[in-house]
Image: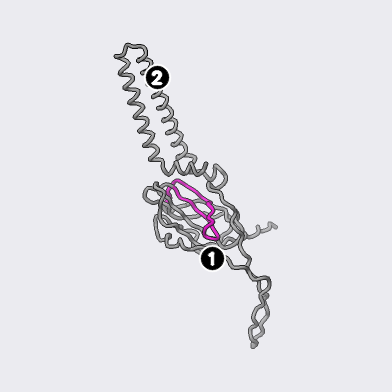
Amino acid sequence: MADAILWIAGNGQWLYIALLLIAAWQIFFWWRAQRRLRFTYFQVERETLINTRSRAVTVLFVVITLMAAMLLSNAFIAPNLTALLGVPPTPTALLPTGIPLPTSTPELVLPGLETPTPEVTGTPPPTRTAVPVQGSPGCLNPSATINSPIPGAILSGEIEILGTANIENFAFYKIELSTLGDNWLTVITNVVPVQGGSLGKWNAASQPPGDYALRLVVINASGGGPEPCAIPITIVEPPPPTATP
């Protein structure tokens, strides 16, 4: 359902044009039938013209209803899609958890003695694909870029993402999160362009601690758009609340 709402918002102008053409065609049918009724005296032909006129009115009513529904969806439902549904519009599987780093045992070093090599305890972590940064050149586009957080930021709790998403023939934008580069999770979606302001808020605590990539994807009316702006970030556990004496 969410994908259908976004598709309607992205192709709204073409859908309005199509509906207006259908409405104009039905108005022509109604006008022609109404005109011919004035000069027709045969009962069968009059019934045919009356049916044609009624059918045109019915189709015209359906077209007006569809246009009103599209206007309501684009104005009130699509901009608040995430809040209304309570989940991202394109749900995907939970992202894989981060790999804990090995811990080292500190040792006291006396003056004049050689520094001992720290012992690493625990099992070395398995290798995994690095956090993708191939979208970084896209951040050079001032019309589709993330200004905050900055690359390498350490995040926890609720985060407000700042930037710009305002390209020519703008349709919508989305903020996505990933660990492996091909498993992107949509966390924010909006059909209202933003110029140097808030792209939305996202709770970093919804994902396990670890290294991630955060990217902005801006789509135009034809389904294309500039190269995504992707930055590496790190999610950590939020600090415990301070006890009140």
Residue 168 screen position, x and y as percent: 36, 50
Question: How far apart are the two marked residues, 1 and 2, measured between alpha carbons?
Answer: 68 Å
Numbered badge on residue 51? 2
Residue on which the image places disc 1: 130
Determine the residue located farthest toward the left in the rendered image: 39
Q: Amino acid at mark 2?
A: Asn
Q: Is residue 110 left or right of residue 10?
A: right
The magenta span reads 172-194
Residue 179 screen position, x and y as percent: 55, 60
Tell which of 3 and 211 is nearer to you: 3
Dot 1 or dot 2: first in sequence order is: 2
Residue 119 screen position, x and y as percent: 67, 77
Q: Is residue 51 above or below residue 78?
A: above
* Magenta stretch contains residue 176: yes
Q: How many marks?
A: 2
Q: Is residue 46 left or right of residue 231?
A: left
Residue 149 screen position, x and y as percent: 50, 59
Q: Secondary structure at mark 1?
A: loop
Residue sitting at x 32%, y 16%: 37
Q: Secondary structure at mark 2?
A: helix
Which quadrant of the figure contains the C terminus?
A: bottom right
Tell which of 211 and 106 is nearer to you: 211
Determine the residue located farthest toward the right in the rendered image: 245
